[in-house]
Amino acid sequence: MTIKIYRGRDCVHHDVSSEHPENPDRLYAIDDQLLSSGLEMICQHGDAKQVKRENLALAHDPYYVDSIFQRSPRTGVIWLEQDTGMTPITLSAALYAAGAGCDAVDWVMEEEDRQAFCAVRPPGHHAEYDNAMGFCLFNNIAVAARYALKHYELSRVAIIDFDVHHGNGTENIIAGDRQILMCSSFQHPFYPHSGHPVSASNILSAPLKAGATGEEFREKVNYWFDALRNFMPELILISAGFDAHAEDAMGQLRLREDDYHWVSKQLRNVADDVCHGRIVSMLEGGYNQSALGRSVVAHIKGLHGDEQSH
């Protein structure tokens, strides 16, 4: 199997509170489902390295990066904003999470027909150029995109984000960048109260009303795939949030595993057509642990081009 799963050593140790929805059990739930599905045995596995500071600066204000390092606590928890806390291990976890994206880019660019999924946290798509937000310190997907453009001298990469929340941080960082096309679906109106209308011509959005079903999701995002083929990215990156699942209380969308499998397989088909099958996917949201684990399995099967079993 050409899919490789990347993990970061301290990603399971970042834990601001047992009451916080973005907690280590998310990764354990994914691992449990990967084992029970049999994917754990047939996927390849990689241990991420921490991201280099200069790669963070491809997507973030260097002064902001410095401030995160400086504010990392020696004990206890500090809050960068109301949802985003840091413990003594959080900085390390965030560096591994961002590093996983860069390592995955390296791996998929080495050969054709490779896909990677980064089972890492904290997530990233709410982190703006110079601001932490919504559980996110560094924007993992934007760092990976800019890293790919610089280190492999690519002309075009695409970012697809189907989290229930708009990836405001990613849009903030890449808006107007003609080398990056972002396709984004999200519940609207909803936190973080952005994304519609779009801020630049390189952003394609598919806002969904509360209660929208998987059928409505598929209808709304179906135009992405022709747009992606026309853009001809040399690499596809996915902000894979699974909190639009019907069982996830974080939002009010009604997606199921089949919908995540469908969109993932469509993106794999596009990747086969335009970029030799090269895809890097990074975990964003997903807070109902059972639904999260099952959805990740469906996502990985879709990326591999497998049929979804019922």
Image (tube, grey):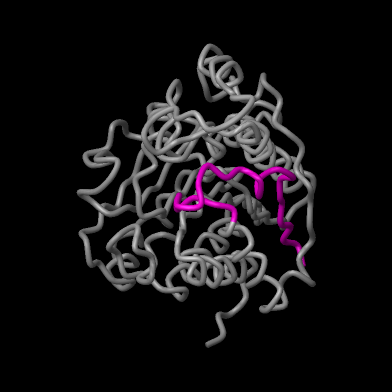
Query: Would you say 154 lies left or right of 233 here?
Result: right
Q: Is residue 67 above or below residue 205?
A: above
Q: Residue at x 62, y 48 (%)?
A: 120
Residue 18: percent from the left, percent from the top? 51, 52
Query: Would you say 31 lies left or right of 15 here?
Result: right
Picture quadrant of residue 217: bottom left
Q: Residue at x 57, y 62 (%)?
A: 268
The residue furthest top is 63
**Magenta part mainly helix, strand or loop?**
loop
Numbered range of the magenta stretch: 1-24
Q: Quadrant of the N terminus?
A: bottom right
The residue furthest bottom is 310
- Decide which of 276, 64 is in the foreground and name it: 64
Residue 11 part of the magenta segment: yes
Q: Is residue 59 above or below residue 34?
A: above
Query: Would you say 156 lies left or right of 165 here?
Result: right
Q: Residue at x 27, y 63 (%)?
A: 252
Number of numbered discs visible in the structure rendering: 0
